[in-house]
Image: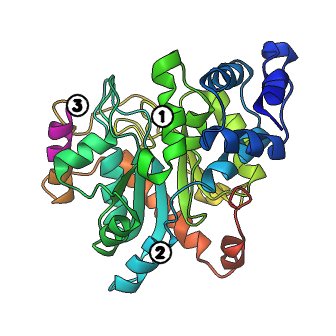
Amino acid sequence: MAIAAYIKEIGRGKDGARALSTAQAHDLMSQVLDGRVSDLELGAFCLAMRIKGETAEELAGFVQATHERCLDLRPALAQAQAAATSPLLGPVLLPSYNGSRKLPNLTPLLAWALAQRGVAVLVHGPRQDPTRITSAQVFAAGGWPVAEGDADVGQAWAARQPAFMPTEVLCPGLARLLAVRWVIGLRNPGHTVAKLLNPLGLGMQVVNHTHPEYAVSLSNYLALVSANALLMRGTEGEPVADARRQPRFDVFLKGQREEALCRAPVEGVLVSLPELPEGREADVTAAWIQSVVDGRAPLPEAIAAQADCLVSALAALNAPDTRAAQAEPDASRP
């Protein structure tokens, strides 16, 4: 179906727009990612979906189409597992698309905390953001692996290091869709899709939201596609716990919320603040993270709790009664 027919359905305004089926959403996103639409059609799609909002079924179609166009990282995982001297957990996917605006960007610190626990970690996101400090910039400032291909990811994991992969390497079509924001001034469905990616279809993914209402819609999506995920309110939109106060962690295994693995938020009056970098600049943040990695500074309790929660979820995935469930293909994967 031509994209104009889809725009006619989704572009009728907030109250008149009709939702697409998963198959229709898959076809629409496939055309967008493959560059088979005009700039005018692309802008109309972004604005219409911005007004209407995505349903869980539409997100399932969008994500599936994106997964089909992602770099295949299964060889990287196999390479790392073969080279590992001890069992490699994971992987854990950390989508880093908001960056730091006021607080230091500590997504790379979470990645290192997981790597030190024996987890294969992939952080993905843009190289730069004109308004924020990205994880890519922190990784670069720290001299940590920035992957330009699947082999780089495998080498980082084999060395027990987290890897950062730019979106343009992981999925060029998605990177182009995200860049539309700088033309029209608004985010689009690509930003939600980016935060839901798990191109391996294995391990755990961290899914973060900025407003409470998104927790409901994202929970519906995770249930629909039988995802394994940690859902939480992010720090300035990043998939890392606020170092000052741990948020709620909701763990989903095969799309079902697992109460035993979830963690309640830390509430009440803060008695003390954790040690944090003295600035949010990439070099300052990277230097402070390295001091934590080296044991010269303490890991904030909230981030340690998040890392431990993810490791517990991975252990549950590998338990005998869930191994078969883990082996089943993710509904959003091709």
- Label 2 or label 3, whichever lies nearer to me, is 2
The answer to whether mark 2 and mark 3 are in CB contact below 8 A is no
Q: Is residue 214 above or below residue 127?
A: above
CA distance separating discs 2 and 3: 35 Å
The disc label shown at residue 280, or none: 3
Residue in the picture at 33% in, 31% down: 100
Is residue 184 in view from this perspective?
yes
Name the residue at 40% across, 61% down: 121
Q: Position of residue 49 (x, y in %)?
A: 70, 25
Q: Which residue is found at the position 51% from the left and 50% from the top?
A: 171
Whichever of labels 1 and 2 marks the residue nearer the N terminus, that label is 2
Type of residue at label 1?
Answer: Glu
> Which span of residues is magenta-colored?
280-288
The image position of residue 151, as x and y in percent, is 36, 69
Closest to the camera, between mark 1 and mark 2, is: 2
What quarter of the picture does the C terminus occupy?
bottom right
Quadrant of res 41: top right
